Amino acid sequence: MPQKVGFLGFIAYSVSLNELVVFNGYLTVESGVITRMGLREEFESLKYSGSLSGFNIKYMGTNQILIPGFVDCHTHAPQFPNIGLGLDKPLMEWLDKYTFPLERRYSDLQFAADVYTKVVKGLLKNGTTTVCYFGSLHLKGTLELVNSVIKCHQRALVGKVSMNMPNSAGYYNDTAKELKDTEDFVRRVREKQRDLVQPVVTPRFAVSCDTELMTGLAKIATRYACRIQSHISEHRDEVEYVLKTNPNCTSYSDVYDKCNILNNQSIMAHAIHLTDDEIKLFAAKGVSVAHCPASNTRLRSGMCPVRKLLDNNIKVGLGTDISGGDNATLLDAMRRTMDVSTHLEFHGGRPAINWKEAFYLATLGGAKVLGLDDKIGNFKIGKEFDALVVDIYADDSQLDNYDYPPEASDEERILNLLHRFLYVGDDRNIVEVYVKGKQLMMVVYDEN
Ligand code: GUN
Ligand code: FE
């Protein structure tokens, strides 16, 4: 890949929840960073003045659009082999019967390396250029996930999961080991790489961690300036259990708050059953939410009131939450977000999330949740170039026979292309994937 590249064609990205920018123009990238952007007419004059000499220019087709890469704010890499299994069970039973027994296997480093490399490649192929991962309880096993992410040039936050409360699978550690392993993990990730991959401190949730462990983990997160991720208020049974086991706390969020894990570095998955006071606390502390609609529906956990969270100025991104979720793609997460919020609206709730807003949540919204919006999430001079070339007419895709009205303006045409991709497209329509300016080789899944 040459160091200097340019793209000429249709470009689309969000600048806020309510503002989508679309234009026919160009963008240049030098050493992974966006250096120029403008309209097509400007490109022509730049080209003729010779300012683009040395650039490898990609002339995109009229069925193609350039968009930012997708950001998955919450998924569990070790759970991918269970995808589609046990989804008729409620959360707590599903964790004990399916999830913990599988996650235990990641003490086997070869198994870990094999699964994780497939996971990362599969996500990149589907346009997920940034992921916030839960690993497993294992220090070395989760370092294998870091290795796979680095090898495949994905952008990621990776967390070694912490748990110290006994469960039927025997999948937990004592507090001292958890604190030591977490600190070691943070250091070792930082030693390996400080560019695309970061460690994230990861108490699983208040059922699996006691307050001593969570308080200790919060200190590590502060000491190393790491983000911290967990689950909160996903299922009513879980909320009830957490309140019963923490009788001195007024709410689920109060349990976390007393352990100092709610602040502007926190990423909380689900947040379905928060009370109004908890929502206010999230807003006041700058806590972000990873909305996981597929898993919320599949495990029948509930319908997260995303519009209400956004109206309360809470940062929200999307998570696929494999394997509570049944689909690892952000295209699916956007559709499920629209569906769930539409159902809430049908039942008297606030206005549904529309497709442009869903696109924001899957890109810039997610980047804000992960604290990466100074680098990625949309296109801006000085930001790093994480992007997808989407081709609506890609062979065999569901959209390859649509005839555009010839009189459509560029703007109408770009909006139609993006709309159709978000509602009906899939990985066949994602023809190129870039992370920090590097074009990634697409995966041949089964080499046999
Ligand atoms: N709560 C605690 N752990 C998990 C998990 O692995 N998946 C989901 N969906 N919820 C959780
Ligand atoms: Fe989860």
Image (cartoon, rainbow, N blue to C red):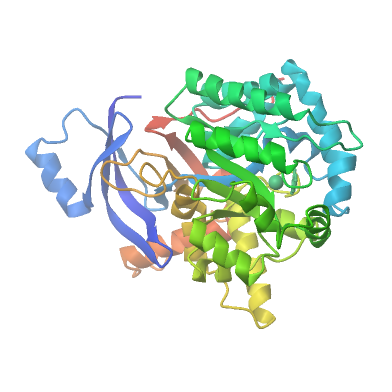
Q: Residue at x 73, y 16 (%)?
A: 110
Does residue 366 appear in the picture of this structure?
Answer: yes
Q: Residue at x 64, y 51 (%)?
A: 258
Indicate the position of residue 184 as horizontal and vertical percent values: 60, 21
Q: Nearer the viewer, residue 240 or 365?
A: 240
Residue at the front extreme of this rendering:
248
The answer to whether residue 445 of the structure is visible from this angle is: no
On screen, residue 367 versus residue 437, left or right, reads right
**What residue sits 31% from the left and 24% below the top?**
2
Count of marks, rendered view: 0
* Residue 389 found in image quarter: top left
Q: Quadrant of the N terminus?
A: top left
Q: Is residue 291 left or right of residue 392?
A: right
Q: Quadrant of residue 424?
A: bottom right
> How far across and down, in percent of the image, does residue 28 sit?
26, 39
Residue 68, image x and y in percent? 42, 47
Q: For this view, does 302 lie left or right of residue 23?
A: right
